[in-house]
Structures are given as C-alpha cells and as structure tokens.
Image (tube, rainbow, N blue to C red):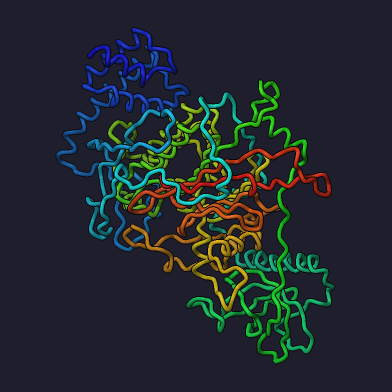
Amino acid sequence: MADDTVAELNQRFGAGNKDLEPDVVAELRSIMRLHQLSVQDLFFKWESYCIKMDMKEFNPSIDTLRAFKQDLQDTLERNNRSQVHIKTEKRVGATPRAAKGANVFGMLDGLATPGPVRPVKSSSSAKRTPAVPRVRPEPTTSSPVKVEDQPISLGNIPPSSFADRPNPGEVIEILNEHLQAAEPPVAPFNESRIKLTATSDQKKLGYKPLAMKLSEASEILDDRIDDFVDLVKKHHSLEDSAFGNPASQGTSEIVAVGRIASDSLEGKLNAASLVLETSRRIGNGLRVPLNLSKLTGYHFFPGQIVALRGINSSGREFTVHQLLDIPLLPCAASAPDALSAHLERLRGGPDAMASDSEPMPLNILFASGPYTADDNLDFEPLHEICKEAADTCVDALVLIGPFIDTEHPLIASGDFDLPEDVRYDPDQATMNTVFKHLISPPLHRLVAANPHITILLVPSTRDAVDKHVSWPQEGFPRRELGLPKTALVLGNPMAFSMNEMVLGVSSQDILWELRHEELVGGKPADQALLSRASRYLIEQRHYFPLYPPTDRQKLPKTGTAEGVPPGAMLDVSYLKLGEMVNVRPDVLVVPSLLPPFAKVVESVVVINPGYLSKRKGPGTYARMTLYPPDMSRLEIASGGMAPHKIFERARVEITRI
C-alpha cells in the first residue's frame, strides 16, 4: 500500500521520469496524514497554492512544501474560527442582491463571496484521442451553489451532467476532407512553431467608452459612405458625373451609393420600408424609398453600403435597375522569402536534422465561450478543451469570450461560492478573483504540459472582468487574473498573423443578427444563409456591418432573472476600428448561436466554432490542420508576392467537446 502511495505521488508531483526526493515524499505523506487527504486531493490543493503564490514551476521542494503545509494549517484554523459566525449569520460577506428588474451590471466589480463552503466534485469523461494524457485528469473545482438552489425567478433549468454528454469527440463537419488530420507528435515541440504579428493597432482600442458624441458618430457613418463611393468609382471605372443624388428628381440614370435603412423604427426591414440613406456630401443626408420591382433577386440588411444604378423620375422613389458589385479587399500575400522563413520555423529552425522532409502541419484549436453550463460554475468544457490541447500537442489555442459571462444565472445573481481551498478576502473579492481561480488553473496545467503552446484570449462585451463594455473592445487587463505568461490577451475584434496566415477574430455574434435583420427577395445570387451572412462581412470590410444592431429585446433570452441580454453595445464613434484593413483575412473566426460551420467564402475560410458550452449542455469547437505551402508551386503575383491560399491547405473539423 505504501509503495502504491509513493508511486502515485511520483506520478502526480514528479517532473517527467524523475522520482521525487525521499525527504519530499516524506513531507507530502506527512501533509496527507495531518489533513487526511488522498494523493489526488493533495495535488489539487498544491496546484491551487502554486497559482495563488504565482509560482513559475509546480515541482515541489522541501521549502515550498513546508510553506504549503503552513498555508493549509492557517486556512484550517481560519475556517474553524469562522464556524461560529456561520451558525448565526447565514451569508457573511455575501454580495448584495439586485431587486427584481434591477440592473446587475453595477454589482459585478464589488462581488464578495462567502467564506467556508462544502466541496462538490465533478468528473471529466475520456476523450476520443488515443494519445497519452499530458494533463493529469482533474475534477474541476466547482461551486456548491447550483441553479436548483436559486430563486424561482431564475427559471427551472434542469441540471446537466457533462460527464454523461452524448458523442464526445464526434466530428460533425469537415472542410477539405481530402487533407489528412494532424497526428499528435510523440512529445511537445522544443520551441514555438508560430510567429505572431499584429496586423491591426491594438492600442487604439483603449479609447474611453461611454463618451460618444452624436456629431462624431454622424461623421463616422457619413465617412463610411464616402469611402465606398471612391471604391466603387475606381472599381467600375466611373466618372464623377455618373454619380448623383437619388433623392432628387431626374430623367437620367445615375449611380447612387448609400446605406440601407428602414423608414420605421419598429418591425423588421421589408420591401415597403426599405430606404437608401445618402451622405451629406452627395445627397445632403436625405433618405429615399427604393423600388426593387425590376430586380430578379436581392438581399439587404440595415447598415449595408450598396451601389445602385437607377433613376428617380417621379421624385418620390428611386427605381433600381442594377446592383453594382462592391470591390473586395485583395487576398493576403507574402514574399517568397517570408514563406521560406515560416517553413523553416515549422521544421524546427535551420539546424533541424531533416531539412528536406515535409514539416508537420500546424495544429490549432478554436473555442468560444460560454465555457460552462447555466446550472454550475465547474467550467468542465474549458478543462476538457485544455486537456485535448495538451494531449494532441497543439501549436495554438484560441479562446474567445465570454469567460466569466454576465448572462450566466449564477454570475448575474452573485449567489455562488468559490472553492473552499481558495484563500481570499470576502470583502475585496471581485470577478477578477473568480477568473483567477476558475479560468486560469486549466491554462496553467496546459502550459505545464506543453510549455511552448501559443494561447490567445479574445474578450467579449459579456465578460464580467472587462470594464471596457463597448465594441470595439480593448482586451481585459491580465494583471490580477493569474494567467500564464505565455497567454496573450487581444482586442475585440483583432486581426493578426500566425506565421503567414492572416487571422481575423470577433466575439460579437454578428451572424445571428444578420440572419434576423436581413431582407431577401426574389432569387438572390447566394441562397445559402450561412455563406451569405459570411459574405456580408467580407464585402462590407467590417466585423460588424449591421447598423443599427438588433434590439436587445429581440435577441435570444438568457438564463438571468430579466432574461434580456446586453446586446451589441456599439460605440459608433469608433466603428472604424472594426474594419478589415488592407487585405482580406485568410481565416475569419466569428462564433455564433447559428449552427457551427466551416466554409470557404471569397477565398476566406470562415469558421463558426459554435459555443463550447450551451446553456443546458456541451457544445462544439473547431480544429484546424494547416499544411505548409508548396514552395515549388508558388504563384508569384505582380509585385513579387505569393497569395497564401489558406483555403486550399487548411482542414477544419467542427467537433463536439
């Protein structure tokens, strides 16, 4: 029995194949006897202690174990002293509750959680991946307060069991199935195979939110129309005389560029309410009804910038004869020398042994929040995706918010507790404390298993830890979140390069809102909803081209007491920061409530990974296998640049968690 305990201690606490020192084993067994802990429970408490103390390595030494032992003793004594208060005060230091119908967002920064709690264990099911697990299986630290304990006003949501989820690991859709899926390496790579380069200025996202001026917002909307006038003029080789004011009566056919809008604030856009809004420079900002009877098919949405050829002979409406194409941004391209450098990085550098062999493809995971179901704060899906990333030695893990979701019933009510082994001041605990002890631990374990993995976090306007509440959105500060040093926090939206691949990411669910707001008539050129909604983003060169956004009352209901989501929360004065700049992204990741998919639209790989956790059950994520370019078959365009053509060499799998 003693030998089994020592073997398990070496497995849990040992570094690689090296056994623990005898004095370290003796100290660990002493702590187990003193506190009546199993090896597994001891390891959980050790990990929490390492994260709390910001220790770079989790390998125990005799000195760190003695400090750990003293910390456990202090925690035990503090809990014993507080038992007297718990008997007389049921909710010491509890968060003030919002009255029915009140706004909960003002309470988030001052969240205070009770002290001692009862532990609740959860389990994680086995994955389909045959690789040897590189992250030790761990039940997530769970909140003992469940939804069934909540007031009736939160609704009766049946608890979901993540361990009993159906078909874990099932691949439900594959893009480029002819390409082979990435095989995990025998061991993690010795260095990162990814070079990150920002293609958009993240510093500009640090603007002051909630300070919008109507004059600035009006100018931004107006300038966008004028910018498209110049694009259409150049693309179609038109003279200035070809453009005109569609609101003015005339007998000659003109080209009108403007924004699609509705003449009614209520109801959905329809053919009767459809108007074209002009800029002040061309049409004095006037709106004119559109007559679409001469078109065989069309599809519009509010905020869409369009170029129309037609005539206003009556002075009452503009009759559209033709829809002119909006020019697309050029495809992303790189110099052959740059592609060769990226290829060398995939091989492991210039000193790699087999420099002529084909390097292993990049293996990238994309996942989007929420990361836990509505009935708990166990974050089991997050633990599982980190375990999958460790087991398959992925090169990059892109996690998209929300992480601590303001639409989660327990977060919105504030009626939950942190795990009992977390040491914190109840009077000063905030949502940063929750993030540090519920989100950061699985990321630390992932980095411990795969030290050179690239982890990217993209926030959401629904993130309780981010005080930048409007979109475009600055990344949340990482100082108090306990994140591993290799994890990078980006803005929302953000465009950056992974080696040669240009990746655009936005956490706003623009696809669902476009589907809800668009007007389709006749036989449109693209009758597929998902590809049509994706094409809107590429044609409009914007991550959120819809304006105004969908009324929050019409968005899908949440599990909170009010049931109304916060909505898009656009800061119109800074919408220009949401534009795609210079080139089309090679890959566009836009999580949505719509069915998850991966499609090629206008040479762009558009991915909706779905949500990793749905309100009542598990969700999906996306895995990309990106093969290197074939240097012998590069197509050198004018200027000596070679298009990336990621859509030809990327395999994307939509997978159930």
> Can I make out residue 574 in this image?
no
> Can I make out residue 430 in this image?
yes
- Number of numbered discs visible in the structure rendering: 0
**Image: 455 above or below 218:** above
Residue 35 percent across, percent down from the top left: 23, 21
Give the camera-side residue of 291 and 174: 174
Q: For the C terminus, give its image quadrant.
A: top left
25 sits to left or right of 461: left
Q: For the N terminus, give its image quadrant.
A: top left
Furthest residue to the top?
22
What is the quadrant of residue 90 in the picture? top left
567 sits to left or right of 323: left
Give the camera-side residue of 442 and 55: 442
176 sits to left or right of 224: left
Residue 15 percent across, percent down from the top left: 43, 17
Give the camera-side residue of 356 and 480: 356
Residue 66 percent across, percent down from the top left: 34, 15
**Image: 603 above or below 118:** below
Residue 360 percent across, percent down from the top left: 60, 32
656 sits to left or right of 492: left
